[in-house]
Amino acid sequence: MFDIFYIGKKLGLFPHERPADSVEHAREQSRTRFCWVVNYLADYSSFDFLWEPVPWQSEQIHIWPSQHQANSGTYLVPKIVTDQINRDHAVVPRKYSVPKLGIDHGEGLSIPTDLSTRYIHDYLGTLRRILSKISDEYVWVVSSVCDYNDFDFTWHPSEWQLDMLHVFPSNEQKFGDTFFVHVPSFMAADKKSLLEWYNINHVEGISVPRRPMPMVSHTCDTHVDIVKSHIWTTPLTLFSINSLPAKIPTVNLWREKTKTIVPLNQSASTVIVPREAAIVIKKQLYDYPYIDKSNRIHAVDQQMDVIFISNGESTVDQNWKNLLNIFPGAKHSSGVDGRENAYKAAATLSKTPWFYAVFAKTEVYSTFKFDYQPDWMQQPKHYIFHSRNPLNNLEYGAMNVNLYNRQLVLDTKPGIDFTLSSAHEVVPLCISVSRFNTDPWLTWRSAFREVLKLRLEVDQGADVEIKYRLDTWLSVANGENAKWCLAGGRDAMQYYDQVNGDYEKLKLSFDWAWLQDYYYSLYKTQPWLKS
């Protein structure tokens, strides 16, 4: 029998086994025509160590493959020096595995390991910490976030990549959580700031599934308080007001900047949040600096109700018909006394957390499909869209469509402006034109209320844009009932001066009955009765 040398651990198959550092080292030590070089991880139970090559192959190095690579670590090496290689041999299966080290993210490891440590901050520091405690040449490093039920730990790298750090993807995530490490190479490398800068082989064709992350389902209008009160046992949690999406992206856990908040739809009503974000979030999920919005196609947004609000306006039939052509599922709330009551009646009619409020004098453009979404990563608020004024061509959030938060509407104790009495955000999209000038009364009351609000903002120190809008309302009006638009603005300015800007007196304009009486006191007519 030829000499037998082992690289790594001793096999214990033959009394004359001897260690060698390499194939060349084994050849130098050999006392026979050929020598065997074997690997302790291979299965030699059916292998014929009495085999020798035919004469015309006697000056070749013979290498047996494993089920994974072209080299199982099994060689028959001639004593003479040669560079000829013969790989035409049957598979010698790898049966055994190198030690397994575990990184626990908090949920507990799913398989037994030889040594484990807690994940802290990033994979680079965690790997350095646990690898410094061992003397093995090769190890697996597994993570508690992964499911290894079907993983083959007999895998090994090719002979050309023995000293590399091998990374297995987690699901589709290239930067996965499972590592095959040549410990001496990793620990001897110059310390780098990022794990990505090491000598890495991203293994292709073998993916390790992540264990399902927890899902927290809730009915709130924001994720903020739910995230802040969540008890974290895993590095990631899915928060949603909807059902589980068909596909959930796999978040990179290598370091802080890669552990992003991941909204899965436009509204972020379904969102993945990393544990690190919870201690940063105060008022909105945007308090956390690392957010990846590239995956907002994996979950379906909830369609918000569309409520048409009318109270006897002459434009009701035309604009209601126009709305139904755009959004056939719209609901109609009509004839409710008082603006505050009308808003709250619409909110009661809505069955969704937000609803689009379309007022009777608003003609929605056919290009708008009511697909804008609120943002569950922020605190609940109203969203104000721009509308065009046909008499003076101003475009801003007046006589417009609003996306109202249902609960805020129900809770509002309004000031002079109902919408601005709660948290709000302006969406600079002009999606409608206000047909407020179809009769004198509607034109006058719209101008009167808007000028009162603008004058109050100007007196409170509003910017130059608000001053420009006020000046335009008072000086520009072209088209049907233009004189009533200017009259409403003029009368508002006079009333404001008359009451010295008293806020409680200005709030009277919120009440339809008061407005009608004030209009009658000025013009001795009741044109609203004709509509």
Image: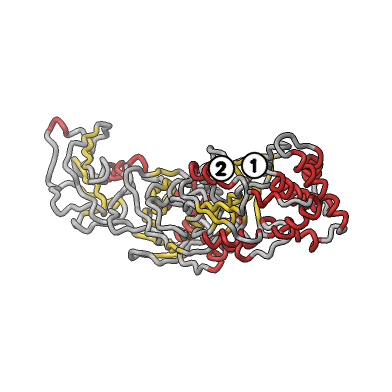
Question: x and y percent of residue 100 in the render?
Answer: 35, 60
Decide which of 415, 180 is in the foreground and name it.
415
Decide which of 96, 431 is in the foreground and name it.
431
Q: Is residue 103 visible?
A: yes
Residue drawn at 76 percent across, 37 percent down: 477
Q: Give the left or right position of residue 468, taking residue 181 as reference.
A: right
Q: Give the left or right position of residue 290, taking residue 55 as reference.
A: right
Q: Give the left or right position of residue 320, taking residue 249 as reference.
A: right
Q: Give the color scheme: rainbow, by chain, secondary structure or one colour.
A: secondary structure
Tell me the residue that label 1 is attached to. Answer: 435
Q: Give the left or right position of residue 356, taking residue 448 as reference.
A: left
Question: x and y percent of residue 89 in the render?
Answer: 17, 39
Q: Nearer the viewer, mark 1 or mark 2?
A: 2
> Dot 2 lies on which element?
helix
> Dot 1 lies on which element?
loop
**Amino acid at dot 1:** Arg
**Amino acid at dot 2:** Gln
Tell me the residue that label 2 is attached to. Answer: 318
| Marks 1 & 2, CB-CB < 8 Å contact | yes
Q: Is residue 236 visible?
A: no
Residue drawn at 53 percent across, 65 percent down: 226
| 231 shown above or below 332 | below
Decide which of 73, 356 is in the foreground and name it.
356
Binning the other alpha carbons within 10 Å of mark 2 as few (below 14), some (14 to 19) or many (20 upward) gives few
